[in-house]
Amino acid sequence: MSDLIDDSASNVRAAKELGWTAVHFVESTESAPAQQASQYQIKHLEELRTIFPQFFTTPPNDPPQKSIP
């Protein structure tokens, strides 16, 4: 499995064409492209929890656990 998360539309477009799961991170100060560049387009990194839940130990919107010293 190949995944790419990037803020470059051209990079995620190329990854999608190669069959990768691509996520275009569009910062709040930037405009989204007229045509979505990849399978996923996000504005907040927290959205990655929904797209790739297998990479996170807590479900989306759960508060982080405090570390025990």
Image (cartoon, rainbow, N blue to C red):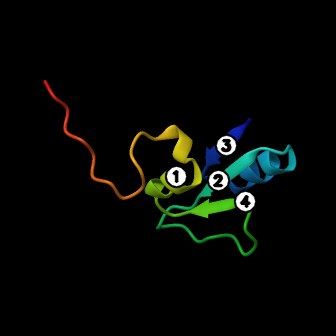
Do the residues bearing badges 1 and 2 touch, measured as CB atoms within 8 Å?
yes
Do the residues bearing badges 2 and 3 touch, measured as CB atoms within 8 Å?
yes
Q: Is residue 8 left or right of residue 25?
A: right
Q: Amino acid at mark 2?
A: Val
Q: In the rendering, at what x and y percent does residue 28 appear? A: 47, 67
Q: Amino acid at mark 3?
A: Leu
Q: Amino acid at mark 4?
A: Gln
Q: Residue at x 49, y 58 (%)?
A: 47
Label 2's element?
strand
The residue furthest top is: 69
Residue matched to label 1: 48
Mark 1–mark 2 Cα distance, whole angstroms, equals: 9 Å
Residue matched to label 2: 23
Residue matched to label 3: 4
Q: Residues within 10 Å of mark 1 (few under 14, many from 20)?
A: some
Residue matched to label 4: 39
As rendered, which of 27 and 1 lies closer to the eye?
1
* Relative to 1, residue 12 above or below: below
Mark 1–mark 4 Cα distance, whole angstroms, equals: 13 Å
Q: Residue at x 27, y 52 (%)?
A: 63
Lower position in the chain sequence, tag 1 or tag 2: 2
The residue furthest bottom is: 34
Q: In the rendering, at what x and y percent does residue 40 appear? A: 66, 60
Lower position in the chain sequence, tag 2 or tag 3: 3
Q: In the rendering, at what x and y percent does residue 2 appear? A: 73, 36
Q: Residues within 10 Å of mark 3 (few under 14, many from 20)?
A: some
Q: Residue at x 46, y 60 (%)?
A: 44
* Relative to 8, residue 27 above or below: below
Which of the two marks, 3 or 1, is nearer to us in this view?
1
